[in-house]
């Protein structure tokens, strides 16, 4: 495959030394760079048909291909993992467009560079009648001010912006800029695409490889063409002078692999972990935990998520889950990585295999929503604090029934304000330990009969009727003697 041609419009101006012909100097430099370039750069496609993968965008009749061939690409965002062809497609647009094509990298460019390009585009539009396509690689690296500098030019139609990003554009880009662009999603390459690319690479390198070696490279690449070609190039170098790549060569070259982990991947991995634990899938949960730790996430962040999981998704079905999760979080602080991996794994498996109930979570969420809806209602008089002098004169505590006065340990009494009487926020589940709690709760609400074999809950020591009558600070009405400073 022939090396990619540098788009003339995107080429930078260079001047030779000693007054020689700059064009000859540029040609010599380009030829030398092409010869020394990495395999991935030497294999960059020069035609749309050479692009591997992305058939949903670039296959026959696909929408992006039609726009490129008709030179009608408008402002767009190319979004997808590294090594999926975003920059390559942008270069191919340069080959097909009759408009000016300019390229910047957000790693190097600033607001001053953007404004200079906008001024040049405005001049070209006025003097030549030519529009401008501005390709901005790594556009997510631009901050809000830098993105705002682009917005005016896009709105006026001075430029058609093509931004390439590996980050979720809904996180990384300003909403006004995103709303004026077409979003094109580039997918990770499939294994058959990677193998086709590797076979082309072997032709360029004039080498051969055993099938298992290519399969291993494809697995290591994880859909990234650049990683695949880099590992292949190193493997070929290790295989010389015979230039036949074997699995052992790939194993030696596999240290070249780099993990993708941006902001979106951070959220995706933790989401997969949480959903696996919630779904009672310990193997999947351990896999995602390993991925999270392998890419360098803070283990304390993982521990916090596990503690939240213990209450949100396991809850009362296994009250010990919170104890285990909290202990794991403490262990992370105590021993750190790599040993704390064991503590996190233990807690992960416990939570994944535990019965699940989100009743406590949904209960508090419903209560919070009811509070926010308002109106705020006063605390009923019988529930107000009565352990101070003068409380009884205000009616505070009058009518309160002390649960320990009843041999069962509870009394039928309304604890919600009158306006909310009868509302239910907690809906018990029958899973695990909560089943026993739910039965007790329903019995006390009169929704279930007390089974004959169930003895009444005994009164605690010191809580008999005789003792209560002898206590001068407590009356059967629940009012507290005004001369006492403490009360129940």
Image (cartoon, rainbow, N blue to C red):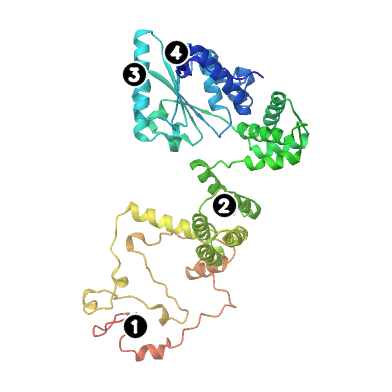
Q: Is residue 67 visible?
A: no
User: Mark 3 — residue?
Assistant: 119
Q: Identify which residue, 113 or 70, lies in the foreground.
A: 113
Distance from label 1 to label 2 (Cα)? 60 Å
Q: Which mark is residue 406?
A: none
For marks 4 and 1, the one nearer the N-term is 4
From the image, which quarter does the C terminus lie in? bottom left
Work out whether residue 343 or residue 440 is closer to the camera in this orientation and state it. Answer: 343
In front: mark 4 or mark 2?
A: 4
Residue 19 numbered mark, or none: 4
The numbered mark at residue 293 is: 2
Mark 4, other Cα within 10 Å: few <14 / some 14–19 / many ≥20 = few
Q: Residues within 10 Å of mark 1 (few under 14, many from 20)?
A: few
Q: Position of residue 161 (x, y in %)?
A: 43, 23
Q: Is residue 264 left or right of residue 291?
A: left
Q: Is residue 422 left or right of residue 289?
A: left
Per the model, the C-alpha gap separating discs 4 and 1 is 109 Å
Where, by quadrant of the figure, is residue 192 drawn?
top right
Residue behind mark 1: 476
x then y, percent, for residue 139? 45, 31
Residue 132 to residue 195: above or below: above
Q: Answer with the quarter of the image where residue 484 lies.
A: bottom left
Neighbours of disc 2 within 10 Å: few (<14), some (14-19), many (20+): some
Helix, strand or loop for disc 3:
helix
Vertical order, 7 against 484 (above or below): above
Q: Disc 1 on helix, strand or loop?
A: loop
């Amino acid at each position: 495959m022939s090396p990619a041609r540098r788009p003339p419009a995107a080429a930078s101006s260079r001047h030779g030394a000693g007054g020689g012909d700059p064009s000859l100097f540029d040609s010599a430099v380009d030829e030398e760079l092409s010869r020394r370039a990495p395999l991935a750069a030497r294999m960059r496609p020069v035609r749309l048909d050479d692009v591997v993968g992305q058939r949903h965008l670039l296959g026959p009749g696909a929408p992006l291909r039609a726009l490129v061939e008709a030179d009608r690409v408008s402002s767009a965002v190319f979004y997808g993992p590294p090594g999926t062809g975003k920059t390559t497609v942008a270069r191919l647009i340069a080959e097909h467009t009759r408009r000016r094509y300019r390229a910047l990298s957000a790693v190097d460019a600033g607001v001053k560079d953007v404004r200079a390009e906008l001024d040049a585009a405005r001049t070209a539009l006025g003097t030549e009648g030519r529009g401008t396509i501005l390709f901005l690689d790594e556009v997510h690296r631009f901050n809000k001010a830098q993105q705002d500098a682009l917005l005016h030019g896009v709105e006026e139609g001075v430029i058609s912006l093509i931004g390439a990003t590996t980050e979720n554009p809904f996180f990384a880009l300003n909403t006004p800029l995103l709303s004026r662009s077409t979003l094109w999603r580039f997918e990770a390459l499939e294994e058959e695409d990677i193998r086709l690319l590797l076979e082309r690479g072997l032709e360029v390198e004039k080498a051969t490889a055993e099938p298992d070696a290519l399969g291993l490279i494809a697995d290591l690449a994880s859909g990234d063409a650049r990683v695949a070609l880099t590992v292949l190039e190193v493997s070929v170098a290790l295989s010389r002078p015979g230039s036949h790549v074997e699995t052992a060569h790939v194993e030696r070259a596999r240290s070249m692999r780099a993990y993708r982990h941006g902001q979106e991947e951070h959220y995706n991995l933790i989401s997969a972990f949480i959903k696996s634990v919630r779904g009672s899938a310990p193997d999947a949960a351990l896999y995602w935990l390993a991925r999270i730790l392998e890419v360098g996430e803070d283990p304390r962040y993982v521990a916090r998520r596990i503690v939240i999981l213990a209450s949100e998704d396991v809850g009362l079905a296994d009250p010990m889950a919170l104890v285990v999760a909290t202990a794991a979080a403490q262990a992370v602080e105590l021993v750190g990585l790599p040993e704390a991996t064991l503590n996190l794994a233990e807690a992960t498996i416990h939570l994944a295999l535990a019965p699940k109930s989100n009743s406590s979570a949904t209960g508090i969420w419903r209560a919070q929503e009811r509070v926010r809806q308002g109106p705020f209602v006063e605390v009923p008089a019988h529930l107000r604090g009565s352990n101070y002098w003068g409380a009884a004169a205000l009616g505070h505590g009058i009518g309160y029934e002390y649960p320990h006065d009843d041999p069962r340990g509870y009394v039928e009494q309304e604890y919600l304000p009158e306006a909310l009487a009868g509302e239910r926020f907690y809906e018990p589940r029958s899973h695990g330990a909560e089943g026993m709690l739910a039965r007790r709760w329903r019995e006390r609400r009169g929704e279930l009969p007390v089974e004959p074999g169930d003895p009444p809950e005994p009164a605690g020591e010191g809580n008999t009727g005789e003792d209560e009558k002898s206590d001068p600070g407590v009356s059967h009405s629940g009012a507290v003697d005004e001369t006492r400073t403490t009360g129940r």
